């Protein structure tokens, strides 16, 4: 068992950088982590569970002593508690619920009504809102009372008698206005809010253009339900972007550097089998051209050049289109335009690379027809690579699938097969000039 640093040092580490500290816990044995959490103040233990990788946190939460578990579950964000709850098996869920207060159970139930990637799933039900008919002096008195309890206030919202969001207060206006003035007279009526069912990626795109600390979440009738803290939203977006990168190459979205080997294998091995199958498919294509390869052995030297350039070009298109999807730059109506643009880029890049590669092949093999064959094959594969790099994620998105899920494997398969087939077919066509 690894030597655990002093309690004071651990506490300072969590206070200084809770995110890094939480990820450091993921490298330790569960019993070691429990031992550390037991020695931390409750608010730091709560921070740890907020930042831990979800799979690790859900496996650890039920290992905590009963007293600490109740305290953590009471103070942790509702959205996080709901995520942990969903990760447990049926028996653990029953025990988990028994440690929650009635209020927390109700909040989780309401929270899980919303779709997985919606604003409702990441919002906090805690917010401060005053009735529009309240006087300024009453609002100030309430604020003083709240701040004396040490509670943090980002924004003060204003609601009407139906609990609909109608405004937001600016502290300067509140302090400089006549105490008997009604809040409806000084509130700012243009309030930026998001619907509880809005996709979190779309919200992140909107929030990135503004500088708000928090965003109010409303229902279809504009009744305020909660708030989303901007820093938490950006954290979610960063995590999703990281997951997308891993998924593109066939790794698990929730895999981490220090995930157990068994978990890593369970996430990667299925896609490695898919990759193996596609490799054999490419080999099967080459097998049709054994005779021409036997006669012109130099063709085997240039096979990986054609396929590799196509794969690299396709990966560039894939990366740009994936970014466009994540940032919502690409609307459904623009999909054909994006595919056309990437295909044209592939064509012009292919022509330039075809000239360079063709000249090298000519001088290498002392045969201009070898340069012609590889040049034409390069253009064909580069055009297809640009088209596929854009069409694969856009097509998967249109079908309701995750566009990041192993897009790179699918793309590489297409560029390998097309590159090999185009190159070797052209070699057969010009066989009399190559032999």
Image (cartoon, rainbow, N blue to C red):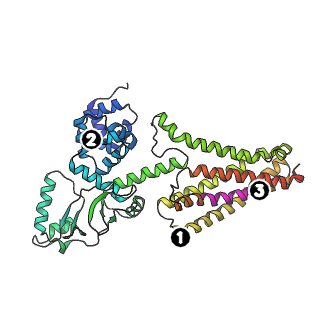
Question: What secondary structure prevails in the magenta region?
Answer: helix
| Sequence-earlier tag: 1 or 3 | 1
| Residue marked by disc 2 | 44
Mark in front: 1 vs 3: 1
Q: Is residue 49 left or right of residue 248?
A: left
Q: Position of residue 228 (x, y in %)?
A: 31, 58
- Within the image, what quadrant is residue 154 found in? bottom left
Badge 3: residue crowd in 10 Å (few <14, some 14–19, many ≥20): many
- Within the image, what quadrant is residue 4 found in? top left
Q: Position of residue 11 (x, y in %)?
A: 27, 36
Rendered view: 79 above or below 338: above
Q: Is 2 in front, or is 219?
A: 219
| Sequence-earlier tag: 2 or 3 | 2
Q: Which residues are magenta?
A: 377-390
Magenta highlight on residue 379? yes
Mark in front: 1 vs 2: 1
| Residue marked by disc 1 | 333
Q: CA distance from mark 1 to mark 3?
A: 35 Å
Q: Position of residue 390 (x, y in %)?
A: 59, 60
| Residue marked by disc 3 | 375
Magenta highlight on residue 287? no
| Residue 164 visible in the snapshot | yes
Number of marks in the image?
3
Which label sits on residue 26? none
Report helix, strand or loop for mark 3.
Answer: helix
Report helix, strand or loop for mark 2.
Answer: helix
**Proximity of marks 1 and 2: CB atoms separated by less than 8 Å:** no
Residue at (55% x, 45% y) in the render = 250
């Amino acid at each position: 068992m690894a030597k655990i640093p002093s309690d004071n040092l651990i506490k300072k580490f969590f206070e200084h950088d809770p995110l890094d500290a939480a990820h450091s816990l993921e490298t330790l044995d569960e019993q070691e982590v429990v031992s550390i959490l037991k020695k931390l103040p409750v608010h730091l233990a709560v921070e740890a569970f907020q930042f831990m990788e979800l799979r690790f946190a859900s496996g650890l939460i039920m290992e905590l002593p009963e007293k600490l578990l109740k305290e953590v579950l009471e103070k942790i964000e509702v959205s996080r508690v709901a995520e942990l709850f969903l990760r447990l098996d049926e028996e653990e869920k029953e025990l988990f619920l028994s440690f929650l207060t009635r209020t927390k159970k109700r909040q989780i139930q309401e929270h899980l009504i919303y779709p997985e990637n919606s604003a409702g799933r990441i919002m906090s039900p805690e917010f401060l809102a005053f009735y529009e008919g309240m006087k300024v002096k009453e609002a100030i008195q309430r604020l003083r009372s709240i701040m004396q309890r040490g509670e943090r206030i980002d924004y003060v919202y204003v609601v009407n008698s139906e609990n609909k969001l109608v405004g937001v207060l600016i502290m300067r206006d509140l302090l400089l206005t006549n105490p008997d003035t009604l809040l409806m007279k000084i509130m700012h009526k243009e309030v930026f809010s998001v619907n509880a069912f809005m996709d979190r990626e779309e919200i992140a795109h909107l929030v990135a253009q503004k500088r708000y600390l928090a965003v109010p979440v409303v229902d279809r009738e504009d009744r305020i339900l909660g708030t989303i803290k901007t820093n938490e939203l950006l954290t979610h977006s960063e995590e999703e972007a990281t997951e997308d990168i891993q998924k593109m190459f066939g790794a698990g979205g929730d895999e981490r550097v220090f995930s157990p080997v068994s978990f890593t294998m369970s996430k990667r091995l299925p896609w490695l089998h898919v990759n193996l199958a596609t490799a054999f498919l490419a080999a099967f294509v080459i097998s049709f051209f054994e005779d021409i390869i036997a006669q012109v052995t130099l063709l085997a030297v240039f096979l990986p050049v054609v396929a590799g350039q196509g794969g690299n070009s396709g990966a560039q298109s894939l990366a740009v289109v994936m970014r466009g999807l994540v940032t919502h730059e690409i609307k459904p109506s623009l999909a054909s335009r994006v595919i056309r643009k990437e295909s044209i880029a592939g064509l012009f890049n292919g022509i330039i690379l075809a000239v360079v590669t063709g000249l090298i092949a000519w001088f290498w093999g002392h045969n201009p027809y070898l340069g012609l064959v590889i040049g034409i094959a390069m253009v064909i594969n580069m055009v297809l690579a640009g088209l596929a790099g854009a069409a694969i994620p856009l097509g998967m998105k249109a079908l309701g699938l995750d566009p990041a899920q192993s897009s790179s494997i699918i793309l590489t398969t297409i560029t390998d097969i097309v590159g090999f087939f185009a190159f070797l077919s052209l070699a057969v066509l010009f066989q009399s000039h190559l032999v």
